[in-house]
Image (tube, coloured by chain):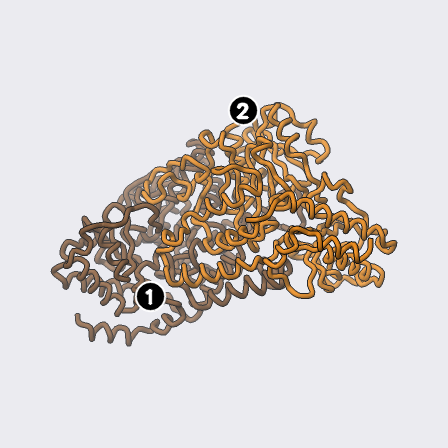
Chain colours: A orange, B brown
């Protein structure tokens, strides 16, 4: 593969024009959109308008006049088609952690008589922490966490499990789990399934309705580009909505929030999963960011994502100097999300050296270098240049003297 | 009282210059800062900088380089002096509703053996809903809500109560409860106290440490001017911090969030009350808004707040045409927050007519007109003009034909 091939790939890229919709810094190759998506240009003007005009000039009246009150539903409905959900099942609110607490509680109440929540040892920690928090609160008779290695999930789907809690794409390795198959196997044993879409929503086709998924959560600030700490979303299948309850029963989830009744009565819709007043500025940013998706086919995103990663792998393999970089992700693109993990003894130092040279990758303890591919704004030339920089860093041992420490690295 | 008196009051106002730090719309008298604070000028530039430079140009690196990771602590410490708290006890996160769930759980665990949460019938509904949600989850053996009328709180402070949950200033009437006395009486019976400061933080002196309060929550978007749906805050007294636990144990509350351990271990500080990733844009807005307070003495805020409300009452009383407007708040300013409630059979229609004429007040069901006074940007001339507009609306019966309905009015 040579540079002409790369140019040809970019030329044939049906998503190439999307890059112009983002504000990308000069002299930077950003391969960390799986941690924090880049800034869509539309967000800048929208946020300025919300702050200056809607809040500043129109003040409290904007709750009605600028439909602030509808934002959680409106944003949820924009996310729905990206994750294969029909209307009325997705809402934007709070964080993934908080939303998991709501859904775990709902699922355990629906599946009364069972207490075990099955998850994987290598799931993103906050998912496990939320189960632990609920377990500590309710006692292990009502909620207990059971962890297995990713490859042994199927054999642990037994009829004493209440809830299967899985992240579709592993945050370290990028391993993609089979949503359809695992959901089906779980259901056969009477197990309800919660999928965490943090690393898959906006990265690849997700088919919640088609897979008959019960519940899901996901993230606004990775592939959906809603900004740092953007509000999250949750999905509850229509068939469960009349039977479920959730304990974080704040006033925004009330059937009539503005009646100010002393007695809680939950909304008869996905709105019951709302809790407190949402951040209008943060949610408006995500709302604007989602407009980028309007003309995008998620199948095109997936095709380009696979091509970008495959080119990255091929280029790494073509350089003898990168032999110490071992691919921890699978080579089988069908079983991969939109990121690649490589292990290396000096992963942390290499990552810092790459960042110094304008290639933003990510480090995950203990020894993983992580590269994320965000097809809306990553080009094949980015991949070409990133690998060349990697060669440069490794061959000149720019990483020999780490000048940074671990404190405060964020997913 | 005549207009010269009003001019003299504005001239003598030590907070008058603060008004210039806000972006107030022309031809508007804003008496609803107790629902949504006005826009501080500093917020506009800060939000633009966070979006364009920190997120747009610096991307994921800003978690460290722009100290995003420190925002919850930094904002908490800016709020602390406004509510009479020494360092290390206040943190900014989530919403009031979510934070109440954390604190209610903590208090019930600390006070094991008791299950009753005492609150007032007329507390802000979401506070009651959160107790109801926890009660439904845990069962009434572990958590049950007991409601009394505000005037009977003291006699219900019995030694079977676990937690006293009160809002310092009533959202409808503006009635100010005696924090010191009620906290002391509760403690004598072994009751832990949670104070909701939604309508008091930034409106009047709050003395959490001095009153020996156990827990508190509060709002970023009213008197603290952090913007619509701004993140909330919570307070946990230092003496409880090593003993408490909270169930919303997300990764931001972990002792070492970036170690990505599968096992949760809570931070040994107020940080254990963090849950998921916070909205950086929303929290930065609040952070900038709080800089307005740097040179402000809360005693000056209180003195002006009382004066504004007293002038408002005096002017209403001076107009015979406003005789049907009955003050629901107490005339005793010591027992009032920074708002006035008047009842009127046509309260809703009058409120809408006022808004049409540029006087932004608020309606609360069933028949309350609510006027909030925010001393940082409300002038005595505002009060004078507001009452004159009220006279105009009432005498010309501009409210006779309500053209609006109740749907979607927000506190």
Pointer 2: residues within 10 angstroms few (<14), some, or many (20+)?
few
Q: Can you say whether B100 is above or below A117 in the image?
A: below
Q: Chain of mark 2?
A: A
Q: Which residue is mark 2?
A: A113
Quick check: can you spot residue B265?
no
Q: Position of residue B279 (x, y in %)?
A: 53, 54
Helix, strand or loop at mark 1: loop
Quick check: can you spot residue A376?
yes
Marks 2 and 1 in Cβ contact (< 8 Å):
no
- In this view of the protein, which residue sits in the foreground, B158 or B403? B403
Residue furthest out toward the left: B320
- Residue B375: mark in rendering: 1
Helix, strand or loop at mark 2: loop
From the viewer's perspective, is B12 left or right of A101? Answer: left
Q: Chain of mark 1?
A: B
Query: How many discs appear?
Result: 2
At horizontal 17% and vertical 57% (from top left) the residue drawn is: B394
Answer with the quarter of the image where residue A8 lies. Answer: bottom right
- In this view of the protein, which residue sits in the foreground, B235 or B310? B310
At horizontal 56% and vertical 26% (from top left) the residue drawn is: A114
Q: CA distance from mark 2 to mark 1?
A: 56 Å
Q: Position of residue B178 (x, y in %)?
A: 32, 53
Q: Are callouts 2 and 1 both on one chain? A: no
- In this view of the protein, which residue sits in the foreground, B95 or A96? A96
Q: Can you say whether A300 is above or below B383 in the image?
A: above
- Residue B61: mark in rendering: none
Q: Position of residue A297 (x, y in %)?
A: 61, 45
Q: Position of residue B121 (x, y in %)?
A: 31, 42
Pointer 1: residues within 10 angstroms few (<14), some, or many (20+)?
many
At horizontal 77% and vertical 57% (from top left) the residue drawn is: A384
């Amino acid at each position: 593969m040579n540079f002409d091939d790369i140019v040809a790939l970019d030329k044939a890229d049906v998503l190439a024009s999307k890059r112009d919709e983002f504000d990308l810094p000069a002299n930077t190759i950003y391969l960390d959109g799986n941690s924090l998506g880049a800034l869509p240009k539309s967000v800048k003007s929208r946020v300025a308008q919300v702050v200056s005009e809607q809040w500043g000039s129109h003040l409290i009246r904007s709750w009605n006049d600028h439909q602030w009150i509808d934002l959680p539903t409106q944003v949820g409905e924009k996310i729905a088609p990206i994750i294969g959900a029909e209307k009325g099942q997705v809402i934007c609110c709070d964080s993934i952690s908080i939303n998991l607490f709501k859904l775990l509680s709902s699922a355990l109440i629906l599946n009364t008589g069972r207490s075990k929540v099955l998850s994987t040892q290598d799931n993103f920690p906050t998912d496990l922490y939320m189960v632990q928090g609920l377990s500590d609160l309710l006692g292990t008779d009502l909620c207990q966490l059971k962890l297995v290695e990713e490859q042994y999930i199927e054999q642990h789907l037994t009829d004493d499990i209440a809830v299967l809690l899985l992240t579709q794409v592993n945050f370290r390795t990028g391993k993609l789990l089979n949503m359809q198959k695992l959901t089906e196997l779980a259901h056969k044993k009477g197990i309800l399934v919660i999928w965490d879409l943090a690393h898959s929503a906006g990265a690849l086709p997700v088919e919640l309705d088609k897979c008959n998924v019960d519940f899901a959560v996901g993230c606004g600030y990775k592939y959906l580009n809603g900004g740092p700490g953007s509000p999250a979303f949750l999905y509850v299948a229509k068939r469960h909505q009349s039977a479920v309850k959730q304990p974080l029963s704040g006033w925004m989830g009330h059937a009539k929030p503005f009646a100010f009744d002393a007695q809680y009565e939950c909304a008869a819709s996905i709105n019951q999963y709302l809790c407190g007043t949402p951040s209008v500025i943060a949610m408006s940013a995500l709302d604007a960011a989602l407009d980028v998706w309007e003309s995008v086919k998620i199948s095109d995103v997936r095709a380009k994502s696979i091509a970008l990663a495959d080119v990255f792998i091929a280029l790494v393999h073509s350089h003898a100097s990168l032999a110490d970089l071992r691919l921890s992700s699978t080579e089988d693109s069908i079983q991969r999300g939109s990121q690649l993990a490589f292990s290396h003894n000096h992963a942390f130092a290499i990552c810092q050296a790459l960042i110094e040279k304008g290639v933003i990758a990510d480090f995950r303890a203990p020894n993983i270098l992580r590269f994320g591919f965000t097809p809306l704004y990553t080009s094949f030339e980015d991949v070409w240049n990133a690998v060349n920089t990697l060669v440069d860093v490794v061959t000149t041992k720019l990483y020999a003297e780490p000048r940074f420490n671990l404190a405060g690295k964020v997913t």
